[in-house]
């Protein structure tokens, strides 16, 4: 599919792209990753449904303070969501420089950002677009018009490999470190240790 910068992409085309792209990443900011500041519960629920609807979806974290040069993007599709505006703008600037080495980028736009060339923007300031997207994905599943990449043998093997590493679990959203004054880059390792030794 040709890359586009439409603020309101064709929903059926986008649903097809999400379902057929290999190794899809859901790249979330710290507040979403650790369960902070979840003020819009309707949108959080829709994002959770999106995770459930895409087999083999891998959730990754975009820390607030780490160099953007360290980020890895999917060769197929990366969805950006829950990232604070200054960090999102810096991330989009970074992507302008490295876009040729990435797969398709889908920006869930909370801020009314100016669309960037080569990205798909979904305006999620209201939940209408996400509702329409999920309904279209459900319709595709119901009609069985395609096999999602995550349901192929390769996709199932990839999804299974993600389960071996607790930090890659899509449902791992809690944080027992938020009351501890430690640098952001160490929170993940500490929480991983707490999770591993939880009774």
Image: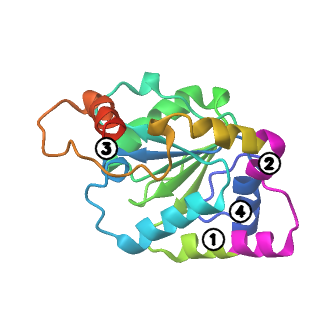
82 left or right, relative to 136: left
Instruction: Decide if residue 146 is on the left or right side of residue 160.
Output: right
Image coords of residue 106 (percent x, y): 58, 50
- Badge 1, how many Cα within 10 Å: few under 14, some, many 20+? some
With respect to residue 143, does 116 lie above or below? above
- From what the image shows, is residue 132 above or below residue 47? below
Which label lies toward us, 4 or 3?
4
Q: Which marked residue is nearer to the observer: mark 3 or mark 1?
A: 1
* Picture disc at residue 15: 4
Asked if the residues shown at circle 2 and circle 4 are in contact, with their CB atoms under 8 angstroms apart, the answer is no
- Frontmost of labels 2 and 1 is 1
Q: Which residues are magenta?
A: 136-154
Q: Is the Cβ of the residue at disc 2 closer than 8 Å to that at disc 3?
A: no
Q: Nearer the viewer, residue 79 or 113?
A: 79
**Residue 4 location, x and y as percent?**
68, 50
Read off the residue under disc 3. 86
What residue is rendered at 32% in x and 51% in y?
174
Q: Is residue 182 magenta?
A: no
Left/right placement of residue 162 relative to residue 171 reads: right
Q: Which residue is mark 1?
A: 134
The label on residue 142 is none
Report the front residue among 32 and 93. 32
Q: CA distance from mark 2 to mark 4?
A: 12 Å
Residue 99: where, in percent of width, then height?
61, 32
Q: In this orientation, which residue lies closer to the viewer: 192 or 29?
A: 192
Q: Which residue is mark 2?
A: 1
């Amino acid at each position: 599919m040709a890359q586009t910068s439409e603020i309101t992409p064709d929903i059926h085309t986008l649903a097809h792209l999400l379902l057929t792209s290999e190794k899809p990443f859901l790249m979330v900011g710290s507040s979403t990753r650790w369960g902070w500041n979840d003020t819009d519960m309707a949108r959080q629920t829709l994002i959770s449904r999106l995770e459930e609807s895409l087999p083999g979806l891998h959730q990754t974290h975009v820390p607030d303070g780490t160099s953007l040069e360290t980020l890895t993007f999917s060769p197929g599709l990366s969805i950006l969501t829950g990232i604070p505006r200054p960090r999102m703008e810096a991330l989009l600037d970074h992507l302008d420089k490295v876009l040729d080495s990435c797969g398709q980028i889908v920006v869930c736009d909370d801020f009314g950002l100016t669309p960037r060339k080569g990205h798909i923007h979904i305006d999620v300031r209201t939940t209408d677009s996400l509702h329409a997207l999920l309904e279209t994905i459900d319709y595709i599943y119901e009609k069985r018009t395609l096999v999602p990449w995550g349901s192929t043998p390769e996709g199932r093997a990839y999804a299974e490999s993600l389960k071996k590493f607790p930090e890659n679990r899509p449902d791992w959203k809690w944080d027992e470190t938020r009351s501890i004054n430690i640098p952001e880059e160490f929170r993940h390792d500490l929480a991983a240790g707490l999770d591993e030794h939880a009774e």
